[in-house]
Amino acid sequence: MDIHAAIQALVASNSALQMESYQNTEVTLIDHSAEIFKTLTYLSSLLSSMKSPLGTRDNPARICKDLLSCEYKLSDGKYWIDPNLGCSSDAFEVFCNFSAGGQTCLSPVSVTKLAFGVGKVQMNFLHLLSAEATHVITVHCLSTQSAGPGWPVSFKGWNGQIFEENALLEPKVLSDDCKIQDGSWHKAQFLFHTQNPNQLPVIEVQSPPHLGTQRKLHIESSSVCFL
């Protein structure tokens, strides 16, 4: 083979390899650019959903007030929240009372049970994100004989503090017919409103031991609302 022809063949081969390498690099850069664009699009969508949540199961708000501050107007009703903003799988449904300033209201699992189906972590975050809380308890009572003066019960709050008559933590008495001693069922209604949200909800109603079987009780719980 002629030396010049060999050199020309070598140069041509090297040029072809360089072109192939350049094309492969270009393809790789295009692939990386596409991945970066997809990531940026996802992050943009995530930030947008956090800034303007929809209150759905897939896009929950932290609390109802977050929905109230959105640009679009929403009606009172049921929405999904996730106070700790972790995985949306632990989000839960609440009633948002926008008419009352954006209250987040948790319904009891049953009106006769002081349980709300929300874990401690989520409840603690809800407390941290709130400035006040409200809860109404109705006590239905049946007295078989005179049980003396005073309320028939005391109340244990979420953080273990006790609400009772003539104490620092004393609920507002909305009505009290339990003082009537006629052998019939009556009721007393108590409003708990506190600027220390971790005191609520009420988790236990306690009847004084000295009453024994003289008085029969059962309770009715409203929703507990945080603002």
Image (cartoon, helix red, strand yellow):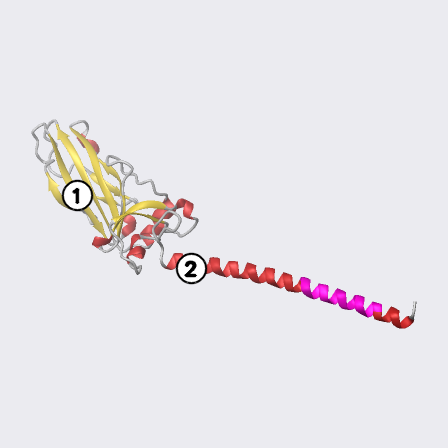
Where does the magenta region start and end?
A: 9-24
Q: Quadrant of the C terminus?
A: bottom left
Q: Which residue appears at 35% of the width and 45% of the height?
A: 92
Residue 178: x and y, percent?
Answer: 11, 35
Name the foreground residue: 4 vs 42. 4
Relative to 88, 136 lies left or right:
left
Decide which of tag 2 and tag 1 comes sooner along the chain.
Answer: 2
Kindly report the distance in space between the C-alpha atoms of the residues bearing marks 2 and 1: 43 Å
Is 216 situated above or below 92? above
Q: Quadrant of the N terminus?
A: bottom right
Name the foreground residue: 97 vs 160. 97
Prevailing secondary structure class for the magenta stretch in the rendered image: helix
Relative to 23, 87 lies left or right:
left
**Looking at the image, which residue sits at the far right?**
1
CA neighbours of label 1 inside 10 A, class few (<14), some (14 to 19), many (20+): some
Circle 2: element type: helix
Is 50 situated above or below 212? below
Q: Amino acid at mark 2?
A: Leu
Using the image, tell me which numbered label, if any, was put on residue 190. Answer: 1
Q: Which residue is mark 2?
A: 47
